[in-house]
């Protein structure tokens, strides 16, 4: 049996706009203890069309944990302990590329890490333990293709590829910072892909990001005068409906008739 034939047990990590997954059947919670402390919340296990999966709310069930305070190591370690075969990480982002409008879906293929001070490795100082993981391609190609394929089947427009810049937050960026990220080649900006992506890589879990554009980034298009973050809810809600349909189709191959 090769990797693509392995029975899948997907994990969804939900971010802003997706803090629970009502489509899960037989949902029940499980507390997972880790050597790194507490995950953001208990894992929610359940099925979609008979296919098991697990959901984790990255910011906690009440969305109370800031991006820099998330215990990424505990979250990823807990998912590994449950033996998941892949992670789809859902998040909201700002668009740096003006052709990406609020509400658009993006599956990035590259990453720039602008975070600091986050616990970003499982590798310690024990002799013989590798510490330099390959991260040339930070997101899993097979999972990315599956996300794009499902979007095609559902008739959703999706941007395949793009560079995700991960900032520290919780504040939004300045116009000059976004200008600099644009000249570095970034297309979207968010606050949570790192160290989540690299920790999954260290534990050998295929990981891909599915992002919803919530707003133009600072200084771009209608955000040139500023960003009213509290006004972004409705945009996210609509697109998160598409994300839910994609997850249903991805996990359970349940496509609308
Ligand atoms: N910047 C950083 N993170 C974000 C943004 C943004 O403009 N929008 C949603 N998440």
Image (cartoon, helix red, strand yellow):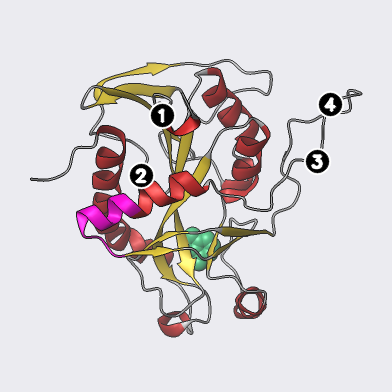
Q: Nearer the viewer, residue 40 or 255?
A: 255
Q: Kindly indicate whether the residue at mark 4 contacts the one at mark 2 (C-beta within 8 angstroms).
A: no
Magenta stretch in the rendered image: 149-157
Q: Residues within 10 Å of mark 4 (few under 14, many from 20)?
A: few
**Eyeballing the image, is 232 above or below 184?**
above
The total number of labels drawn is 4
Q: Is residue 55 visible?
A: no
Q: Is mark 3 within 8 Å of ligand 1?
A: no
Residue at the (56%, 49%) spot, across then down: 139
Q: Is residue 182 above or below residue 143?
A: below
Q: CA distance from mark 2 to mark 4?
A: 36 Å
Q: Relative to 33, does residue 130 appear above or below in the rendering?
A: below
Callout 2 environment at 10 Å: few (<14), some (14 to 19), or many (20+)? Answer: many
- In the rendered structure, does residue 151 fall within the stretch colored magenta? yes
Q: Position of residue 73 (x, y in %)?
A: 64, 32
For the residues marked 3 and 1, what is the alpha-carbon distance in whole angstroms?
29 Å
Which secondary structure lies at badge 1? helix
Q: What residue does disc 4 label?
A: 129
Mark 1 residue crowding within 10 angstroms, few (<14) / some (14–19) / many (20+): few
Distance, label 2 to label 1, CA atoms, is 29 Å
Q: Is residue 219 above or below residue 230?
A: below
Q: Which mark is residue 132?
A: 3
Q: Is there any visible trace of residue 211 in the rendered image?
A: yes
Q: Quadrant of the C terminus?
A: top left
Look at discs 2 and 1 and give the one toward the viewer: 1
The residue sitting at the front extreme is 1
């Amino acid at each position: 049996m090769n990797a693509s034939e392995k029975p899948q047990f997907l994990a969804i990590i939900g971010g802003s706009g997706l803090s629970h997954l009502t489509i899960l059947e037989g949902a029940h919670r499980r507390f997972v203890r880790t050597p790194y402390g507490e995950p953001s919340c208990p894992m929610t296990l359940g099925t979609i069309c008979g296919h098991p999966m697990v959901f984790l709310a990255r910011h906690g069930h009440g969305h109370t944990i800031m991006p820099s305070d998330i215990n990424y190591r505990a979250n990823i370690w807990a998912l590994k302990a449950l033996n998941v075969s892949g992670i789809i990480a859902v998040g909201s982002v700002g668009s740096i590329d003006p052709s990406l409008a609020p509400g658009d879906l993006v599956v990035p293929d590259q990453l720039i890490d602008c975070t600091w001070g986050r616990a970003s490795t499982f590798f310690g100082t024990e002799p013989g333990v590798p510490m330099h993981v390959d991260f040339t391609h930070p997101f899993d190609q097979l999972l990315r293709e599956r996300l794009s394929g499902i979007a095609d089947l559902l008739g959703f427009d999706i941007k395949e590829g793009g560079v995700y810049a991960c900032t520290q937050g919780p504040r939004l960026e300045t116009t000059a910072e976004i200008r600099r990220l644009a000249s570095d080649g970034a297309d979207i900006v968010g606050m949570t892909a790192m160290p989540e992506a690299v920790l999954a890589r260290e534990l050998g879990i295929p990981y891909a990001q599915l992002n919803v554009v919530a707003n133009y980034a600072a200084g771009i298009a209608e955000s040139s005068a500023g960003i009213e973050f509290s006004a972004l809810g409705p945009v996210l809600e609509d697109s998160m409906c598409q994300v839910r349909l994609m997850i249903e189709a991805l996990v359970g191959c349940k496509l609308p008739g």
